[in-house]
């Protein structure tokens, strides 16, 4: 699965959350006798089998500015996301089934509509999940863990406290970009980290909390504004 960004902050967020990274799978082989392509296929299978995962992404533009995203998801229909912009503002999201709850903070709103916000912004906006559009900064809970391009095995390394192997992927459809994936070589061969670089952006994404218990709940009713109810 590949991760790529676009030139606007919202599109960056969409790409980061909608997914585009390669992933990993299971078995105890350290990777010494597997081809790089087989390791990626194994990694994808392991990631698709997960019931939950935490995804942390940081995208830095060559012209300046950073977007960081933390997504916690069951890879199906329940997830939370928080996006922070280096130029100011955060955007939070809770998705439960067919409903999104979205909370931009004051700085986020001020950057988009200066002077329109007074006081702190603590309310969540409730809206249908199917109203989300590419570029609006909202996340899907699902991720397409799929291989692409041609993989080449690199050096053995560590990601945090886990042993891993470095895999480099080239793709004819992306002449200017390079992808590096780090697949665990102990325990299940999960994808631990993925890095994408091109002339405009560097994006690093890490995966953790594999199959950890989730506690995803809607906000308190008093903190929610129903977008459908207040529509003119």
Image (spheres, rainbow, N blue to C red):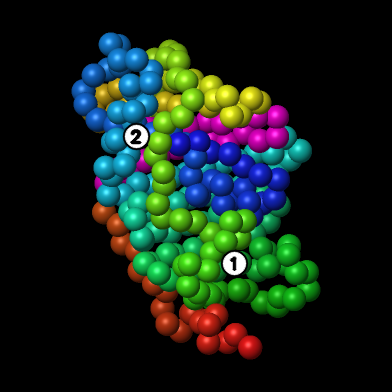
Q: Can you say which quadrant of the picture contains the C terminus?
A: bottom right
Q: State yes or no: residue 196 in magenta.
A: yes
The x and y percentages for residue 156 are 39, 15
Q: Which residue is mark 1?
A: 104
Between discs 2 and 1, the one toward the N terminus: 2
Instruction: Farthest residue to the front: give it.
Output: 172
Q: Quadrant of the N terminus?
A: top left
Left or right relative to 147: residue 48: left
Q: Is residue 63 above or below residue 170?
A: below
| Crowd class of label 1 (few under 14; some 14 to 19; many from 20; radius 10 Å) | many
In this view, the residue in front, 97 or 124, is 97
Q: Residue at x 40, y 69 (%)?
A: 98
Left or right, 85 with reference to 127: right
At 42% from the left and 31% from the top, the residue drawn is 147
Could you tell me residue 164's position as x and y percent? Answer: 36, 22
Residue range corresponding to the magenta coloring: 190-212
What kind of element bears circle 2?
Answer: helix
């Amino acid at each position: 699965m590949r991760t790529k960004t676009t030139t606007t902050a919202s599109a960056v967020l969409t790409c980061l959350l909608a997914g585009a990274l390669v992933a990993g799978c299971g078995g105890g082989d350290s990777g010494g006798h597997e081809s790089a392509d087989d390791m990626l296929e194994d990694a994808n299978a392991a990631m698709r089998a997960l019931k939950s995962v935490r995804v942390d992404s940081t995208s830095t533009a060559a012209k300046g500015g950073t977007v960081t995203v933390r997504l916690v998801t069951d890879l199906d229909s329940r997830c939370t996301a928080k996006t922070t912009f280096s130029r100011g503002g955060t955007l939070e999201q809770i998705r439960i089934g067919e409903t999104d709850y979205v909370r931009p903070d004051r700085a986020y709103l001020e950057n988009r509509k200066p002077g329109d916000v007074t006081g702190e912004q603590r309310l969540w906006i409730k809206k249908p999940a199917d109203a989300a559009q590419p570029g609006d900064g909202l996340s899907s809970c699902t991720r397409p863990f799929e291989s692409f391009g041609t993989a080449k095995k690199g050096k053995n390394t560590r990601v945090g406290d886990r042993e891993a192997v470095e895999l480099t992927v080239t793709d004819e459809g992306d002449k200017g970009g390079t992808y590096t994936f780090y697949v665990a070589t102990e325990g299940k061969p999960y994808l631990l980290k993925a890095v994408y670089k091109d002339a405009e952006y560097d994006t690093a994404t890490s995966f953790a909390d594999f199959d950890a218990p989730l506690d995803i709940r809607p906000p308190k009713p008093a903190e929610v504004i129903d977008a459908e109810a207040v529509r003119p």
